[in-house]
Image (tube, coloured by chain):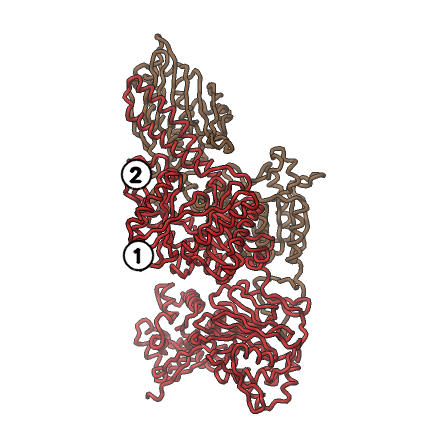
Chain colours: A red, B brown
C-alpha cells in the first residue's frame, strides 16, 4: 500500500479547493493535511451565521462569510483550503475569481469516492442520516461532469483522488513558488536594460569585477565573480541593439552556471512568441534581433526559446528585502502569481492613454509605492537612476546612447558604463520617471488613523487615532512644508521629585538616576529659556533644491516644536539662516562634516519673541491681577487689624501671597526683552542632529559642544567684522562623574548659582548621547529646573510648604515613557533622513512625534 | 480675590447696619469654607459714618486643580497648563460670585430677620472690585452697570508696566457708587461678575446657571444688554461639555509651542458662524455654487473644507445630489457639522447620501477619487502659499473630479467693507487674500497644468471699480487626449477603471 501513496503538490501560497460529495471525507482530509486555521469550512460558516451547520436557508450567508474569511487570509499571503462540496461549477467559479483577485493560484483536489461509501458514512452521522438519497446522487453526477473541465475553469493544478483508498493514502507536499528566492542573499549586481549592447554589457561586468569565460570562437559564454556575487538581469536583453544573440549567449550561460538570475522583459516575451512561430509585428527593434539570429544554429534558437519560456516574472530576494522585475511591481503583487502580476511585471502600469508619440502613458505607480522591499526594475529609460519611495529604475537607455547601469546590493552603489554609440533612435525623449518633489505629495494613509511606527531603537511605537487626528490638523494648517519638516524634538522628562527642603527638582536626583542606570559620565548643560527651535540650513539654494526639493529659493527652515514657522516673515527666516550658514562656513564645518546641509536642535531667545501671546494672555495677566488684588486685600486687613479684629493669620498669608506674586512676575520678566528685527534675538544651538548621509544624534555631547563653540566663535568674529550684534549663543556646561561625590557637589553648586541669578536650570545628559542600558534606551536627558523658574510652571505660591508637600506627588512614569518614545521617533526620523529614505518614511516618524505630543500628560512636567 | 462693599450713615441710621443686612458682625472676622478655598468676611472700617465689609476668597490653587477631573494618566488631570497657573486666585470671577451666594445668601434674597424693614431701604453704596476681568473692556462694564443705577468708575489696568508694548490687561479696577438696595447690588454682582469674566471654567457646575438666571429677576428683563448677558451664560454652559471633549489634544499641542490654545483651535468660531458678515453674501455664494453644480449635472459632490456643514446641508436638500461628502481637517468642525445636520437622527435614506470625513488637502487621498464635482468654498485662502502646490496636486492631480468650484475673497473689494480696517484681511486665519489678477494667475496655471478649462464668475454685487466681493473659478476637466491602447508593444492598457490620473506628456 505504501507504494500507492500519492504526492499532491500544492504551491505554498494558493487557494486549495476541495471538491467532493457529502461524505466523501473532505473534512477528514483537510484535518489530516492542513492546519485547522488554514481550513475554511462551509459547514462551520453555516453554524456561525445560523447556529446550525445543516441549515440550508443560511447557505448564501454562509458562503459570503466563507469568501470573506478566505479573502482576508489570501490578502495577507496565507495558504487557504476551502472545505465545501464545490461540485457545482458556479461555486468553483467564485473561488477561482477569489484566487485571481488575490493573485494566488487556485488548486483543485477532487475526492472522487463512490456513492455507496458516501451514503454509508452519512448514515452514521445523526445530523446527516436523513439526507435524501437524491441529493447525494445529484452531487455525484455534478462531480463527474466537472472533473474534466477543471483546468479549463482556471485551476492551475488539479489532483484527482479515485476512491477512498487513494484519498487515505494521499500526501500533500507544499511547493515553493518559483518567484520566492528569499533564501538567496547575494550579494547581487542588478543590471538594467541591455537591448543587445553586448560590448557594453561585457565592459560593465568587467567593471563589476566579473571574469569572462569564452568559448572556442572567443565568444563570451559566461562570467563569474571571484567573490561569488550573483548578477541579476532585469530583462530586455534583446532588440534594437547590435548583438542580441551575443547578449543572450552570455546571460543564458551565466544563468545556467548559477552566476546569474534573469527576469523577462516585454521584449523577451515578444521574441519568445516569435520563436514559437506566432505572428508578431517586427517593430521596436525586433527586426534587428530576427536578422541577427539568422546566423545562429537551430540548437541555439531552441535553447533561447526554452530559456525565454522558463523566465519567472519577478523574484523576491534577500529575505524579502529586494524585488527584481522588469517594469516594476506594486507591493501586493510581490511573490504572487497571476496573469495580471506577470503583465504588470512585464509592462508596468499604464493609464490607458497614449501620448503625443503614440506610446502608452505610464502610470506613476512608484510614487504611491509604500512597501518595505526595494523594487529594482528597468523598462522606462531615464537620464539617471534615482530612488523613488524605495524603488529604482535602472534603465538608463544604453541602446539610445545613454549608459548601462548596475546596482550593487546590498551596498546600494550604482556602477555604470557609457554607451559606445547611439545604437537606436528613441521614439520619444527620455523621461524622468521621478517627477519633481513638488508633484509627489504625501498620502493621507501615510499618517492618518491608528498607526504603528517601527523604530530601530525602541521597537514599535503606536499612535492613537485621536492623537493622529489632532496632529493632522496642526500639520495641515500650521506647519512648514513637510519636505523641510524632517525632525521634531522629543519632550523631556524632569528629574525625579526631590525631597530637599524647598525644592521640587534638584540635580542630585538626576545624578542618582543615571548612576543607577550605569552611566558614569554626564554633561550638565545650561537650559536656555526661550522657545525650542529646529533649524535646517543648506549651504546654498542648489543644495536646498537638490536635497529638500525646495523650488522657491528658500535655503532652509526654522520651525517650532510643533512644526510651525518660527517667524511670520520668510525673509526673517532667511536672515537667520544666512547668519547660521556664515557661522558654519566660518567654523569650517561644511567640509569637516562633508555635507552641504545641517539639521540643528536649538533654543531661540527671548521667550517673549514667540510666546508673547501666551505671556500676555496668561503669565502677565496673572501678575497683573495679583498685583491689583493683593495690595488692597493686605491694606484692608491691616485696617481691620488696626481696629483690633483678629485677622493676624489671614494677614500674614496675604502678605506671603503678595510677595509670591511679585516673585512670579520677576521670574517671567527675566526671559522677556524687546527685539528689533534680529537685534536682540539669540539662537542657542545645542545639538547638530544630521548631515548628508549621516545621523549625528549619537555623537558625544562634548564633541557636539566643541562644534557648537566653534560656531559661536565664528558668529562672534563675523559680527565684530560686520559691526552687528551676535546671533548665536553658547551653552555653559559642566561635566559630572557619577562615581565621584565631589564632582556632583560641584555641579550642584554650579546649578544653584546659575538658577539664583535667573537661569532656568539645566539639562543633564549622558556624555555619550545615545545610551542603551539593560532595560533598553536610557533617557537622553533630564531637566532640573530652578526654584524660581518653577513658579512660572507651578504657580506663584508653589513654594509654600503646604503646597509643596502636595505637589511632590507627581507621577513621572508616563512622561518618561513618552519622552523615550518621542526620542526614538526623532532618532528614527533622523536615521531615515540621513539614509536618504523617501519623504513619506521621514514624515511618518515626524508626524508620530507630533501626535504623541498631544497625549495627555501632566503639562507641568 | 477680593471685593469691598461700603456705605455711609449717621447716628440715626448708622452705617454699621450693613452688618445686620449682611448677617455678619462688624467686629469679627468670619471664615466660611467653599469648594475652592476659604471665604473670609471682615470689616476694615465700621463706624456710624462709614462701614466697609470686605469679602476675601483665599483660593487654594492646588485644590483648584485637583478638583479638575482627575482622569489623566498617572493621576495627572486631563487638562492644560492654563489650569495650573491662572488668574483665578486673584481675579473677581465666578468663584467670587459663588462665594457671594454662599456667604451672603440671606442678604441676596433680601431677608433680614432682625430688622425686616432694612432690606427694602436704598443705601448709599460703594462697591470696589480691584481686579475685575472684563471681556469687552471698560465700555461694556459701563453698559452693563449704568442702566442699573450705578455710577461706574472702571480703570483699565496695564498688563505689565515694564513692557508697555504689551498693552492693557483685561482687568479693570471697578468702583461702583449708587443708591440701591443691598440685595439688588449683590444680585447684580452675582450675575455680572461671571458675565464680564466670560471665561470658560471647567469647574462651574451646570446647575448653577439656573440659579444665576433666577438672580436676574426684576432687573435682567428690561436690561438693554439682556441678550449679551444671557448669551454669555448659555455659551459658557455649552462650553462646559464641548471643551472638555474636543479641545484637549489641540490644546496640548498649542502648549508644547508656548501658544494659547485658541491660536490653533480656531477652526470653529464660537461667537459667530464661519461666515463673515453680511450673511447674505454667504447665501449668495452657496446659491452660485449650487448653480454651477446643477449646470454640470453633478450627482456625487465633495465639499472640501466643509467647516460646519452649511453647504452640505443645502446640497442634501436637492435630490439630484446622490452623494455629498463633507471633508474638513478639523475634527471639531466636523463634530459641529454632524450636530447641526443631526446626523444621528437622520432618516437612513437621507443619511446614506451624506458622509463627513476628516481629511487634509496637504495629502493625496484615495477616498476622494472619482467624484463628479468638488467645491472649495473659501478654503484656499486658509492655506499657506508654499503649500498650495500640494493642495493643487491633491485636488486637480489626484482626486480629479470632473468639475471643481473654487471661491475666495476678492481682496480689491475689501475697501468697500466699512467695518474692515484698511490692510486687514476678512478673517484672522486668512493667510492671504487675492485680487482678481492673482486669483486668475493661480487658477489659470493650475488648470493648464492639470488639463482643466477654467471660467470665472462674480459672486455678490459686482462693483464697477473693485469687482465682486467674492470671486469664483469653475474648472472643467478637458476630454482625455488620445485613444486607449490595446496590447501595445511597449505596454498594455492596464484597464484601470478607478483613477484616471493623467500625466502630462512632456
Q: Is residue A637 above or below residue A444?
A: above
User: Residue at 32% across / 46% down in the picture?
Assistant: A746
Q: Is residue B305 above or below residue A776?
A: above
Q: Secondary structure at mark 2?
A: loop
Q: Which mark is residue A502?
A: 2
Q: Secondary structure at mark 1?
A: loop
In the image, residue A648 lies at what x, y percent? 28, 24
In the image, residue A292 lies at what x, y percent? 64, 85
Q: CA distance from mark 1 to mark 2?
A: 29 Å
A723 or A679: nearer the viewer: A723
Q: Chain of mark 1?
A: A
Q: Tell which residue pokes out farthest to the right in this image.
A: B464
Q: Are marks 1 and 2 in contact (CB under 8 Å)?
A: no
A524 or A623: nearer the viewer: A524
Q: For mark 1, does the 10 Å Cα neighbourhood hold few (<14), some (14 to 19), or many (20 or more) residues?
A: some
Q: For mark 2, does the 10 Å Cα neighbourhood hold few (<14), some (14 to 19), or many (20 or more) residues?
A: some
Q: Is residue A795 left or right of residue B289?
A: left
Tell me the quarter of the image containing the C terminus of chain A. Answer: top left
User: Residue at 61% across / 34% down in the picture?
Assistant: B421
User: Residue at 50% across / 80% down in the picture?
Assistant: A260
User: Residue at 45% across / 67% down in the picture?
Assistant: A75
Answer yes or no: is residue B343 visible. no
Instruction: Give whichever of discs 1 and 2 has the lower sequence position.
Output: 2
The residue wearing badge 1 is A518
Q: Is residue B417 above or below residue A172?
A: above
A487 or A244: nearer the viewer: A487
Amino acid at each position: 500500500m505504501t507504494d500507492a501513496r500519492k504526492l499532491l503538490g500544492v504551491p505554498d501560497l494558493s487557494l486549495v479547493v476541495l471538491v467532493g460529495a457529502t461524505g466523501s471525507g473532505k473534512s477528514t482530509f483537510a484535518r489530516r493535511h492542513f492546519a485547522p486555521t488554514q481550513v475554511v469550512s462551509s459547514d462551520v460558516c453555516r453554524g456561525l451565521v445560523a447556529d446550525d451547520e445543516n441549515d440550508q436557508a443560511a447557505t448564501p450567508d454562509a458562503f459570503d462569510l466563507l469568501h470573506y474569511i478566505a479573502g482576508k487570509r489570501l490578502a495577507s499571503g496565507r495558504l487557504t483550503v476551502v472545505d465545501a462540496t464545490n461540485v457545482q461549477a458556479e461555486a468553483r467559479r467564485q473561488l477561482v475569481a477569489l484566487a485571481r483577485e488575490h493573485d494566488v493560484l487556485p488548486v483543485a483536489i477532487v475526492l472522487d469516492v463512490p456513492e455507496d461509501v458516501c451514503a454509508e458514512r452519512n448514515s452514521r452521522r445523526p445530523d446527516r442520516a436523513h439526507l435524501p438519497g437524491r441529493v447525494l446522487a445529484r452531487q455525484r453526477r455534478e462531480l463527474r461532469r466537472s472533473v474534466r473541465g477543471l483546468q479549463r475553469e482556471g485551476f492551475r493544478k488539479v489532483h484527482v483522488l479515485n476512491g477512498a483508498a487513494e484519498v487515505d493514502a494521499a500526501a500533500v507536499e507544499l511547493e515553493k513558488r518559483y518567484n520566492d528566492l528569499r533564501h538567496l542573499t547575494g550579494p547581487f549586481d542588478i543590471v538594467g536594460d541591455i537591448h543587445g549592447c553586448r560590448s557594453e554589457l561585457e565592459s560593465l561586468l568587467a567593471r563589476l569585477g566579473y571574469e569572462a569565460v569564452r568559448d572556442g570562437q572567443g565568444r563570451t559564454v559566461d562570467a563569474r565573480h571571484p567573490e561569488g556575487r550573483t548578477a541579476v538581469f532585469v530583462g530586455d536583453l534583446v532588440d534594437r541593439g547590435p548583438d542580441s544573440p551575443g547578449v543572450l549567449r552570455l546571460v543564458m550561460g551565466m544563468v545556467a552556471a548559477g552566476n546569474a538570475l534573469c527576469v523577462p522583459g516585454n521584449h523577451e516575451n515578444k521574441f519568445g512568441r516569435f520563436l514559437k512561430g506566432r505572428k508578431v509585428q517586427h517593430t521596436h527593434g525586433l527586426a534587428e534581433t530576427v536578422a541577427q539570429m539568422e546566423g545562429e544554429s537551430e540548437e541555439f534558437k531552441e535553447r533561447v526559446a526554452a530559456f525565454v519560456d522558463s523566465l519567472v516574472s519577478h523574484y523576491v530576494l534577500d529575505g524579502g528585502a529586494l524585488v527584481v522585475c522588469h517594469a516594476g511591481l506594486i507591493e501586493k503583487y510581490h511573490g504572487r502569481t497571476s496573469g495580471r502580476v506577470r503583465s504588470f511585471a512585464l509592462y508596468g502600469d499604464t493609464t490607458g492613454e497614449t501620448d503625443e508619440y503614440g506610446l502608452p502613458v505610464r502610470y506613476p505607480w512608484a510614487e504611491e509605492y509604500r512597501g518595505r522591499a526595494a523594487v529594482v526594475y528597468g523598462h522606462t529609460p531615464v537620464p539617471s537612476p534615482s530612488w523613488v519611495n524605495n524603488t529604482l529604475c535602472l534603465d538608463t537607455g544604453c541602446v539610445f546612447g545613454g549608459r548601462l547601469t548596475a546596482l550593487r546590493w546590498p551596498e546600494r552603489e550604482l556602477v555604470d558604463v557609457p554607451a559606445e554609440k547611439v545604437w537606436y533612435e528613441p521614439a520619444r525623449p527620455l523621461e524622468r520617471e521621478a517627477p519633481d518633489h513638488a508633484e509627489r505629495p504625501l498620502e493621507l494613509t501615510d499618517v492618518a488613523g491608528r498607526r504603528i511606527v517601527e523604530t530601530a531603537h525602541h521597537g514599535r511605537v503606536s499612535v492613537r487615532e485621536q492623537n493622529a487626528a489632532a496632529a493632522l490638523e496642526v500639520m495641515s494648517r500650521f506647519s512648514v512644508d513637510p519636505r523641510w519638516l524632517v525632525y521634531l524634538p522629543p519632550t523631556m522628562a524632569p528629574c525625579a521629585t526631590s525631597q530637599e527642603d524647598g525644592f521640587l527638582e534638584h540635580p542630585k536626583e538626576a545624578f542618582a538616576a543615571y548612576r543607577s542606570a550605569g552611566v558614569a559620565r554626564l554633561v550638565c548643560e545650561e537650559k536656555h529659556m526661550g522657545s525650542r527651535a529646529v533649524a535646517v540650513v543648506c549651504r546654498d539654494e542648489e543644495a536646498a533644491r537638490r536635497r529638500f526639493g525646495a523650488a522657491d529659493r528658500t535655503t532652509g527652515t526654522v520651525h517650532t516644536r510643533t512644526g510651525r514657522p518660527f517667524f511670520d516673515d520668510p525673509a526673517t527666516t532667511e536672515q537667520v539662516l544666512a547668519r547660521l550658514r556664515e557661522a558654519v562656513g566660518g567654523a569650517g564645518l561644511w567640509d569637516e562634516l562633508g555635507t552641504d546641509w545641517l539639521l540643528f536642535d536649538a533654543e531661540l531667545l527671548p521667550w517673549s519673541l514667540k510666546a508673547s501671546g501666551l505671556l500676555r494672555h496668561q503669565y502677565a495677566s496673572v501678575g497683573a491681577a495679583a498685583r491689583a488684588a493683593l495690595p488692597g486685600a493686605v491694606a484692608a486687613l491691616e485696617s481691620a487689624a488696626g481696629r483690633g479684629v483678629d485677622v493676624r493669620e489671614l494677614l500674614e498669608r496675604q502678605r506671603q501671597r503678595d510677595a509670591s506674586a511679585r516673585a512670579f512676575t520677576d521670574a517671567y520678566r527675566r526671559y522677556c526683552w524687546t527685539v528689533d528685527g534680529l537685534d536682540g534675538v539669540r539662537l542657542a544651538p545645542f545639538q547638530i542632529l544630521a548631515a548628508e548621509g549621516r545621523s549625528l544624534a549619537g555623537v558625544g555631547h562634548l564633541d557636539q559642544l566643541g562644534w557648537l563653540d566653534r560656531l559661536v566663535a565664528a558668529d562672534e568674529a563675523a559680527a565684530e567684522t560686520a559691526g552687528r550684534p551676535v546671533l548665536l549663543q553658547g551653552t555653559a556646561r559642566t561635566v559630572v562623574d557619577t562615581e565621584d561625590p565631589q564632582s556632583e557637589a560641584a555641579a550642584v553648586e554650579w546649578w544653584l548659582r546659575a538658577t539664583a541669578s535667573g537661569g532656568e536650570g539645566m539639562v543633564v545628559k549622558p556624555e555619550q548621547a545615545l545610551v542603551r542600558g539593560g532595560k533598553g534606551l536610557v533617557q537622553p536627558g533630564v531637566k532640573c529646573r530652578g526654584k524660581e523658574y518653577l513658579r512660572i510652571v507651578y504657580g506663584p505660591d508653589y513654594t509654600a510648604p503646604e503646597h509643596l508637600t502636595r505637589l511632590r506627588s507627581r507621577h513621572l512614569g508616563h512622561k518618561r515613557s513618552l519622552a523615550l518614545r518621542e526620542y526614538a521617533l526623532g532618532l528614527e526620523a533622523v536615521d531615515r533622513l540621513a539614509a536618504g529614505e523617501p519623504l513619506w518614511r521621514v514624515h511618518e516618524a515626524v508626524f508620530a512625534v507630533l501626535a504623541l505630543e498631544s497625549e495627555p500628560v501632566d503639562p507641568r512636567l | 480675590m477680593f471685593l469691598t462693599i461700603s456705605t455711609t450713615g449717621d447716628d440715626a441710621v448708622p452705617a454699621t447696619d450693613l452688618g445686620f443686612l449682611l448677617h455678619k458682625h462688624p467686629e469679627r472676622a468670619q471664615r466660611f469654607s467653599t469648594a475652592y478655598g476659604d471665604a473670609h468676611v471682615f470689616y476694615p472700617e465700621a463706624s456710624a459714618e462709614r462701614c466697609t465689609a470686605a469679602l476675601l476668597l483665599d483660593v487654594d490653587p492646588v485644590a483648584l486643580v485637583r478638583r479638575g477631573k482627575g482622569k489623566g494618566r498617572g493621576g495627572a488631570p486631563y487638562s492644560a497648563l492654563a489650569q495650573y497657573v491662572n488668574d483665578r486666585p486673584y481675579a473677581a470671577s465666578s468663584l467670587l460670585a459663588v462665594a457671594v451666594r454662599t456667604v451672603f445668601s440671606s442678604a441676596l434674597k433680601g431677608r433680614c430677620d432682625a430688622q425686616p424693614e432694612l432690606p427694602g431701604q436704598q443705601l448709599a453704596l460703594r462697591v470696589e472690585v480691584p481686579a475685575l476681568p472684563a471681556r469687552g473692556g471698560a465700555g461694556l462694564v459701563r453698559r452693563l452697570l449704568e442702566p442699573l443705577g450705578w455710577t461706574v468708575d472702571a480703570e483699565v489696568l496695564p498688563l505689565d508696566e515694564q513692557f508697555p508694548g504689551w498693552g492693557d490687561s483685561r482687568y479693570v479696577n471697578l468702583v461702583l457708587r449708587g443708591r440701591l438696595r443691598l440685595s439688588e447690588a449683590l444680585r447684580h454682582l452675582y450675575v455680572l461678575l461671571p458675565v464680564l469674566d466670560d471665561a470658560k471654567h471647567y469647574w462651574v457646575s451646570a446647575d448653577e446657571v439656573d440659579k444665576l438666571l433666577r438672580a436676574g429677576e426684576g432687573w435682567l428683563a428690561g436690561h438693554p444688554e439682556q441678550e449679551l448677558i444671557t448669551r454669555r451664560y448659555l455659551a459658557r454652559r455649552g462650553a462646559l461639555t464641548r471643551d472638555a471633549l474636543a479641545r484637549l489634544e489641540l490644546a496640548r499641542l498649542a502648549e508644547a509651542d508656548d501658544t494659547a490654545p485658541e491660536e490653533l483651535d480656531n477652526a470653529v468660531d464660537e461667537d459667530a458662524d464661519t461666515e463673515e458678515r453680511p450673511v447674505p453674501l454667504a447665501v449668495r455664494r452657496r446659491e452660485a455654487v449650487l448653480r454651477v453644480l446643477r449646470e454640470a449635472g453633478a450627482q456625487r459632490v465633495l465639499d472640501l473644507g466643509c467647516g460646519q456643514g452649511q453647504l452640505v446641508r443645502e446640497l442634501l436638500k436637492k435630490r439630484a445630489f446622490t452623494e455629498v461628502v463633507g471633508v474638513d481637517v478639523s475634527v471639531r468642525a466636523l463634530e459641529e457639522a454632524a450636530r447641526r445636520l443631526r446626523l444621528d437622527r437622520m432618516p437612513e435614506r437621507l443619511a446614506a447620501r451624506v458622509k463627513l470625513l476628516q481629511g487634509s488637502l496637504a495629502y493625496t487621498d484615495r477616498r476622494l477619487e472619482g467624484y463628479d464635482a468638488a467645491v472649495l468654498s473659501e478654503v484656499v485662502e486658509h492655506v499657506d502659499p508654499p503649500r498650495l502646490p500640494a493642495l493643487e496636486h491633491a485636488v486637480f492631480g489626484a482626486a480629479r473630479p470632473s468639475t471643481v468650484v473654487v471661491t475666495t475673497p476678492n481682496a480689491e473689494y475689501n475697501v468697500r467693507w466699512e467695518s474692515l480696517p484698511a490692510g486687514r484681511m476678512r478673517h484672522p486665519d486668512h493667510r492671504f487674500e487675492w485680487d482678481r489678477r492673482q486669483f486668475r494667475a493661480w487658477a489659470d496655471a493650475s488648470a493648464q497644468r492639470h488639463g482643466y478649462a477654467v471660467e470665472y464668475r462674480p459672486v455678490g454685487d459686482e462693483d464697477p471699480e473693485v469687482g465682486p466681493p467674492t470671486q469664483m473659478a469653475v474648472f472643467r476637466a478637458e476630454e482625455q487626449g488620445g485613444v486607449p491602447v490595446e496590447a501595445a508593444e511597449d505596454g498594455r492598457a492596464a484597464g484601470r477603471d478607478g483613477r484616471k490620473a493623467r500625466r502630462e506628456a512632456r
